[in-house]
Image (cartoon, rainbow, N blue to C red):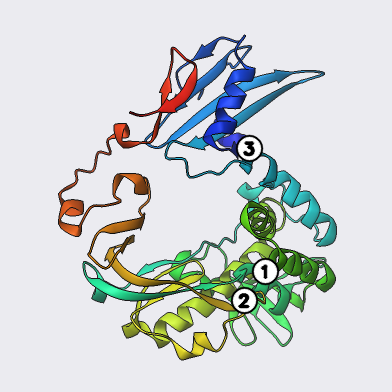
């Protein structure tokens, strides 16, 4: 039976999505979720709040299941399908250059984990403030290039105090804000202890960094995602590498939060929003991995972990709210935003599925 979570979903633009549908004109399309179904020779087309999905089998020497996604508010540009690098390709490219042994069969065996930070300062919750948003350039690549890593070619010492030139990991540690405590150094207790090593292929990492800095548009976005996609797959192969990178990145961010807490509005993974310029970050603005940039400057309203970017008149011009497309909020003021029900009206999407035309069409 089909499980979309076990397949790679390729993003594409509305035009590319309709092009795929055109190629399936001779195939029966069922307008329902394919989850739990036997795909067979049919194609499945369905939509959730703001995205449409297409699933079908491709028949050649063997059956290959294809899964595609597009945003009904046209957030994906033409070229996504060809230019955005797949997780598999990223894993192969980085895996050949950054060789680490497999230490688990899959992620179910991993007893160490890490997750990015999502933090909001209650001091500024529900307030419209002027925000300076900083973004760290290639944060995880920067940590990988500069910080200590575990030498997992040797068996770890178990349950002890981390010694000099060693790195330790805490079993089943917390994620997010506290994730930095999952990796420890000399003098601290750890469940798994490895010798320290460093970036095994600086030339590859520097080449990737230089490529990214020369690109723009979709190709830049694709290259920026290459290392992070590979790092994500390491949870299935060598979770100590992934945890070492993410935990040390988180610790750096958390240290900044503690240092500038009264001035900071939020933090998400490798970005920080502040009510005033932070000289320490201004001095680190640059294009090297781990440097900072001033990404956005303007009015911001925070509703816990939701962010609404406002124009000078107080109307929403952009938003970051999980599960709520920005198209549904643009042009509203804060009072109107508060009056919205939690149910999102899909008729506000720019596109919809037209079953008669077997295409995505403008939602007039």
Name the element at disc 2. loop
Q: Is residue 58 left or right of residue 313?
A: right
Judging by the rendered image, the residue that carries numbered circle 1 is: 141
First reached walking from the N terminus: tag 3 or tag 1:
3
Disc number placed over residue 290 in the picture, else none: 2
Q: Is residue 150 left or right of residue 329?
A: right
Q: Quadrant of the C terminus?
A: top left
**Is residue 318 depicted above or below 157 in this figure?**
above
- Spatial distance from mark 3 to mark 1, Cα to Cα? 23 Å
Residue 37 visible somewhere in the drawing: no
Instruction: Give the x, y percent position of residue 208.
Output: 76, 65
Residue 252 visible somewhere in the drawing: yes
Q: Mark 2 and 1 residues: CB-CB less than 8 Å, in contact?
A: yes
Instruction: Give the x, y percent position of residue 65.
Output: 66, 25
Q: How many marks?
A: 3
Judging by the rendered image, the residue that carries numbered circle 3 is: 8
First reached walking from the N terminus: tag 2 or tag 1:
1
Q: Quadrant of the N terminus?
A: top right
At x 66%, y 82%, the residue is: 162
Instruction: Give the x, y percent position of residue 320.
Output: 38, 56
Question: Mark 1 Cα within 10 Å, few/some/many (few <14, many 20+)?
Answer: many
**Is residue 25 depicted above or below 248 in this figure?**
above
- Spatial distance from mark 2 to mark 1, Cα to Cα? 7 Å
At x 51%, y 65%, the residue is: 173
**Is residue 117 depicted above or below 320 in this figure?**
below
- Spatial distance from mark 3 to mark 2, Cα to Cα? 29 Å
At x 36%, y 29%, the residue is: 363
At x 62%, y 13%, the residue is: 40
Name the element at disc 1. helix
Which residue is more in the foreground, 243 or 277? 277
């Amino acid at each position: 039976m089909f499980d979309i979570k076990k397949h790679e979903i390729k993003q594409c633009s509305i035009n590319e999505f309709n092009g795929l549908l055109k190629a399936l004109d001779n195939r029966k399309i069922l307008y329902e979720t394919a989850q739990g179904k036997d795909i067979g020779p049919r194609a499945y087309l369905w939509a959730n709040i703001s995205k449409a999905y297409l699933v079908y089998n491709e028949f050649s020497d063997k059956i290959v299941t294809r899964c595609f996604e597009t945003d009904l508010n046209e957030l994906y540009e033409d070229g996504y399908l060809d230019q955005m690098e797949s997780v598999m390709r990223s894993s192969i490219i980085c895996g050949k250059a950054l060789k680490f042994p497999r230490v688990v069969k899959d992620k179910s065996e991993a007893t160490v984990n890490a997750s990015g930070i999502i933090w909001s300062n209650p001091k500024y919750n529900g307030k419209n403030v002027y925000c300076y948003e900083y973004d760290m350039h290639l944060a995880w690549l920067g940590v990988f290039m500069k910080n200590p890593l575990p030498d997992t070619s040797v068996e770890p010492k178990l349950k002890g105090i981390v010694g000099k030139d060693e790195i330790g990991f805490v079993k089943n540690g917390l994620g997010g804000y506290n994730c930095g405590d999952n990796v420890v150094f000399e003098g601290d207790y750890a469940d798994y202890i490895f010798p320290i090593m460093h970036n095994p292929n600086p030339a590859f990492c520097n080449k990737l960094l230089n490529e990214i800095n020369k690109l723009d548009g979709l190709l830049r976005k694709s290259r920026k995602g290459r290392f992070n996609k590979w790092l994500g797959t390491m949870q299935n192969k060598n979770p100590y590498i992934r945890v070492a990178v993410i935990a040390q990145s988180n610790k750096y961010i958390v240290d900044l939060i503690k240092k500038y807490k009264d001035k900071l509005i939020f933090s998400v993974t490798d970005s920080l929003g502040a009510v005033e310029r932070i000289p320490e970050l201004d001095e680190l603005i640059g294009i090297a991995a781990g440097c900072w940039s001033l990404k956005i400057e303007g009015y911001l309203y925070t509703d816990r972990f939701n962010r609404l970017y406002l124009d000078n008149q107080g109307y929403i011009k952009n938003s970051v709210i999980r599960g709520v497309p920005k198209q549904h909020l643009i042009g509203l003021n804060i009072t109107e935003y508060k009056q919205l029900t939690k149910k999102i009206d899909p008729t506000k999407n720019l596109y919809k599925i037209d079953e008669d035309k077997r295409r995505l069409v403008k939602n007039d």
